[in-house]
Amino acid sequence: TQPSEVTTSITTQPSEVTTSLPYSSTVIKVQGCGVTVGCYSDCVGLKCSFIISWNVNESNAVYTLTSTVARTSAKWIAVGFSSDNLMGNDDVMGCVSDTSGNVVLFTARNTKHSSPIMYKDTEIKLTAQKSEDGVLSCTFLRPIAASGDERVNIDEPWTLLFAKGPGKISSSGQATVMYHKSDYHVSALSLKVSDLVDLGAKFIEYPLVKVHGSLMIVAWIFLASVGIIIARYYKPVFIHEVCSQKAWFLAHRICMMLVFCATAAGFIIIFVEVNGYSKIMESKTFLKGHPIIGIIVMILTFLNPVMAMFRPHPGTPKRPIFNWAHWFVGTSAHFLGVVNIFFGVMLIKANVPFYLVYILVAYASWQIFVELLLEIIKFLGKRQDNCEVYAICSKDGPGDGLAVDSTRIIFVKRIILGVHFFIVAAFAVTLIVLLDLGNEKLATY
């Protein structure tokens, strides 16, 4: 990932002859792609949101970058030459344009989690530029040969990375390059400058991030939502025993054990993906709390079953303390888990449309509605649930005296539970499917 803002003092270095690029209100595919010039783009037919074309000119290469950009603010576009399909330790060249149409060249070495290392390469020339009507286009003359540890030899195969984002140019000619968010693509193949191909683009994907998110959705949107209301409202309904345990408690314990397993698996997977603690580089500051909240959720998820293993016996003075502590830890874990999923779908690596946030709002509203409805039913039925949340009610235990809901209330509660089960399952499946598809696949539908 990239930092929120990088500033460089590199200014435009035009060659002796500067040409004007033709005006265009949309990006049209370059003629001769795959024949006279190499092309890398996301074109559908002749229409593109970006295209990079190149050819060889003796010991130099000529690259032209063209992309749709924001009309009302300064912006940058760039191409990176990478040894893999991920950002990090890449040779980057690009241009920044302000709202007046001024264009500045920049060159850099991209890094993975920190600011790009900007450097000035006087051998790379900006020979043509155009910023007009929502389209930015820059043409570079670049030596094919490498230059130290900075400029790479493009006669060797490299994966092409394209990105664009907001930027600005100061009055002194300094260019500021800000984080590109989700506006980046990666070539499907590694290419040399002599490869005159017509290659499509794909988004950089993070499959382990999607697995992590899917596990957390299963844990907190589905399993916890069902397990918590069973323990809180269904003890008088499921009083029969299964394997010498109350049915409500067995269902609750299975749900929460699966919550722990899914959360732990997702926690380990994301640590593997980021090689340790994740340093979130986002323009929205509150999203940087995602890994911190995740660690807190994992601690709470681990703590609750450990607390249950050492719970005081029913009727002892410390039992009420355990009950409140267990309720508080479980409720906090559920609340923070859902909040963190909100944060997660807004992260760049999730690569999902923003309307997933609205789906999560709908889920949260439903969960609150169901719990309020069950509270009202409990109040109107005047049935106080005296069996403790995590009690294992034995034959001689206090659970034997538990009042049983009336037949009518039991029927209504079972209908509510069945509807709730299928609705939260539908929310979870919808979120997982959209997360798996991502922006680029959804855009094709």
Image (tube, helix red, strand yellow):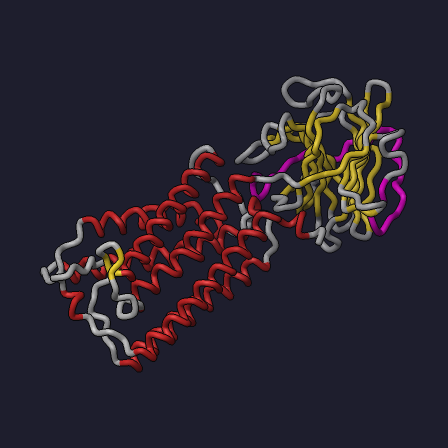
In the rendered view of the protein, which quadrant contains the C terminus?
A: bottom right
**Is residue 163 highlighted in magenta?**
no
Residue nearest the observer in this picture, 283 or 307: 307
| Residue 333, quarter of the rendered image | bottom left
> Viewed as shown, does residue 133 lie left or right of 2?
right
Vertically, is 187 above or below 343? Answer: above
- On the image, the x and y values in percent for residue 46 come to 85, 45
- Along the horizontal axis of the image, is 193 left or right of 343? right
- The residue at the point 81 percent across, 33 percent down is 198
**Where does the magenta region start and end?**
1-29
Q: Please say whether residue 338 is visible from this viewpoint.
A: no
The location of residue 209, given as percent across then percent down, is 52, 42
Q: Is residue 288 left or right of residue 198?
A: left
In the picture shown, does residue 232 fall above or below 42? below
Q: Is residue 418 above or below residue 8?
A: below
Question: Going by the picture, which residue comes out furthest to the bottom?
Answer: 380
- Within the image, what quadrant is residue 81 found in? top right
Residue 4: within the magenta?
A: yes
Q: Quadrant of residue 89?
A: top right
Q: How many marks?
A: 0
- Residue 109: tell me if it is visible: yes
Residue 199 placement (x, y as % from top left): 77, 34
Residue 311: percent from left, percent from top: 17, 53
- Which quadrant does the N terminus fall into? top right
Residue visible at 35% across and 47% down in the picture:
260
